[in-house]
Image (cartoon, rainbow, N blue to C red):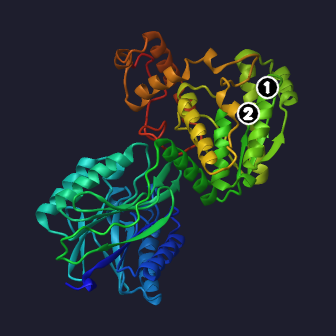
């Protein structure tokens, strides 16, 4: 067989904007042109829902929107011809015709070729097929894996194996990141390749969309499940891979394989990408946050600088009489390290005025200090068109250790799905990453090593109200991620009194979490979108 029967397949993972059909179409055209000019591609593959964007929610119910998607497909097919790409098979993720009837956003693959649009949704088993150079290529939209239903994907592969032989399988997906999911994905898709005895080409979305972060990391697998190409994680990327001629019996060609990341790097980059896209796609000019000198605000500030540039970040120190000199110094040090704008806005006078008028004492006075700070950050956000960042972590959100309309203020919470113990790990990872690149570590060491405190009263420490974070986070992971009850947690070795206290704190704080800002999902069970617990309930539902 001649090498003319080789098929050059370009794999394009792109960052789209939900419902921005025109901009998404332009990006698809741009990447298709690159695939043609740089790789002489016969096929260009884009992720699921790459034209309309994902997720769409109830936007799919709008008939005008569905019509616009269909029109955009036809227009894109014409533009491909006009740009000399008519002979290329361009696979674009689009809305399924069933989206309206089923009232959910299901996807199809549209094949654009010679100015025509063919939507591959004709097979009841979920597969589409197209022919190129006398080769049969199967396609599959991986709606199931987005729900972690790996069994459904494997069953679909068995259906393909039994019903129709394909020379390769192209899978389009929009699979949100969560830590540990990539390992499951690799295992499942390796089994698929082995089942169908053909290469698997997997295209995944990349970018942030509200709570979801899509990590990309698209890949090509051999029929044995071996990696032949792996794209970048958390970045747009384009790669070409060649499917050899039918009588090929050697080793499949290996393309660029991006190195894997540690868990800490994955979580950090997911948080940064989610924040970056939230800022850009919602048209903010930068970010503003309160800088306390503590580890949470330090980590969030470092993420913000990585997301939009330190010069576009404003940190505000808002000391009261309980704020230590060390904390103020650490906040200023951090701002200098990341190149952020830095302001000091004392809240003592404002707080005293409120406290005297309202006769606020004890916990009410502590909360009032946090609310004064929230007012300053939100006012600064309004005045300068900056995204206000909440700096609370998952441990605090779980236990309600945050003041409503105070430190919960903000439009986005970059570490809301990161436990406190992980916050320290991520800070150390980020500093170590900087040192390897001969850069200044962004987070002051003192912010990492000092005991955590809200500094709302003399000598206050978090441990005054909460168990040590090592123990607290272990209990929370069991209660939240694993849905353990009292019996399971005590069987893990935790004492009953501490477990009951933590469970009670979590249950009592559900009302707070309903009002907190959104933030990136990085775990298997994110508070809010993954964990639905009634606010009003019996206090012994353990």
Residue 298 screen position, x and y as percent: 68, 38
Which residue is nearer to you in this view: 185 or 318? Answer: 185
Q: Can see residue 206?
A: yes
Instruction: Estimate how packed mark 1 is, as few (under 14), some (14 to 19) or many (20 or more) residues with alpha carbons within 10 Å.
Output: some
In the rendered image, which residue does mark 2 sit on?
292
**Mark 2 element type:** loop
Which quadrant of the rendered structure holds the N terminus?
A: bottom left
In the rendered image, which residue does mark 1 sit on?
323
The residue depicted at 79 percent of the width and 51 percent of the height is: 383
Which quadrant of the rendered structure holds the C terminus?
A: top left
Relative to 180, is 453 on the left or the right? right
Label pair 1/2, CB-CB below 8 angstroms: yes
**Mark 1 element type:** loop
The residue depicted at 80 percent of the width and 44 percent of the height is: 342
Instruction: Estimate how packed mark 2 is, as few (under 14), some (14 to 19) or many (20 or more) residues with alpha carbons within 10 Å.
Output: many
Q: Is residue 372 above or below residue 152?
A: above
Q: Can see residue 406?
A: no
Which residue is nearer to you in this view: 68 or 366? Answer: 366
Relative to 245, is 357 on the left or the right? right
């Amino acid at each position: 067989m001649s090498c003319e029967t080789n098929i050059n397949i370009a794999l394009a993972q792109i960052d789209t904007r939900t419902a921005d059909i025109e901009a998404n179409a332009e990006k698809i055209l741009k990447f298709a042109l690159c695939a043609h000019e740089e790789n002489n591609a016969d096929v260009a593959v884009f992720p699921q829902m790459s034209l309309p964007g994902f997720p769409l929610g109830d936007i799919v119910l709008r008939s005008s929107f569905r019509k616009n998607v269909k029109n955009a497909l036809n227009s894109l097919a014409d533009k491909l011809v006009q740009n000399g790409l008519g002979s290329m098979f361009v696979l674009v993720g689009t809305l399924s015709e069933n989206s309206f009837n089923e009232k959910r956003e299901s996807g199809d693959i549209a094949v654009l070729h010679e100015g025509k649009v063919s939507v591959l949704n004709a097979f009841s088993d979920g597969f589409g097929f197209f022919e190129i150079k006398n080769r049969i290529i199967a396609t599959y939209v991986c709606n199931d894996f987005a729900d972690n239903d790996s069994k459904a994907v494997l069953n679909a592969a068995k259906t393909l194996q039994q019903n129709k032989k394909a020379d390769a399988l192209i899978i389009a997906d929009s699979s949100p990141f969560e830590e540990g999911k990539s390992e499951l994905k690799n295992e499942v898709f390796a089994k698929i390749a082995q089942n169908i005895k053909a290469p698997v080409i997997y295209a995944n979305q990349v970018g942030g969309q509200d709570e979801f972060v899509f990590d990309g990391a698209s890949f090509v697998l051999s029929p044995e499940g071996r990696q032949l190409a792996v794209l970048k994680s958390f970045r747009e990327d384009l790669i070409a891979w060649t499917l050899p001629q039918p009588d090929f019996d050697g080793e499949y060609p290996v393309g660029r394989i991006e190195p894997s990341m540690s868990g800490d790097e994955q979580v950090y980059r997911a948080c940064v990408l989610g924040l970056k896209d939230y800022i850009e796609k919602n048209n903010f000019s930068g970010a503003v946050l309160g800088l306390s000198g503590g580890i949470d605000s330090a980590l969030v500030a470092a993420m913000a600088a990585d997301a939009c540039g330190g010069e576009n970040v404003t940190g505000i120190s808002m000391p009261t009489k309980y704020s230590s000199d060390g904390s103020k110094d650490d906040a200023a040090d951090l701002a200098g390290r990341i190149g952020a704008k830095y302001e000091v806005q004392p809240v003592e006078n404002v707080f005293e005025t409120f406290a005297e008028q309202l006769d606020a004492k004890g916990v009410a006075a502590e909360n009032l200090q946090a609310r004064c700070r929230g007012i300053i950050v939100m006012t600064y956000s309004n005045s300068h068109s900056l995204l206000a960042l909440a700096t609370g972590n998952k441990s605090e959100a779980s236990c309600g250790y945050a003041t409503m309309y105070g430190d919960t203020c903000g439009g986005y919470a970059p570490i809301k799905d990161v436990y406190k113990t992980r916050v320290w790990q991520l800070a150390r990872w980020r500093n170590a990453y900087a040192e390897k690149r001969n850069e200044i570590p962004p987070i002051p060491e003192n912010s990492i090593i000092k005991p955590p405190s809200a500094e709302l009263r003399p000598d206050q420490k978090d441990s005054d109200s909460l168990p040590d974070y090592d123990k607290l986070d272990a209990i929370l992971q069991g209660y939240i991620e694993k849905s353990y009850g009292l019996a399971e947690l005590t069987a893990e070795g935790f004492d009953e009194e501490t477990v009951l206290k933590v469970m009670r704190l979590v249950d009592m704080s559900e009302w707070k979490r309903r009002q907190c800002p959104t933030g990136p999902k990085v775990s298997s069970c994110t508070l809010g979108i993954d964990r639905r617990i009634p606010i009003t309930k019996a206090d012994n539902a353990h």
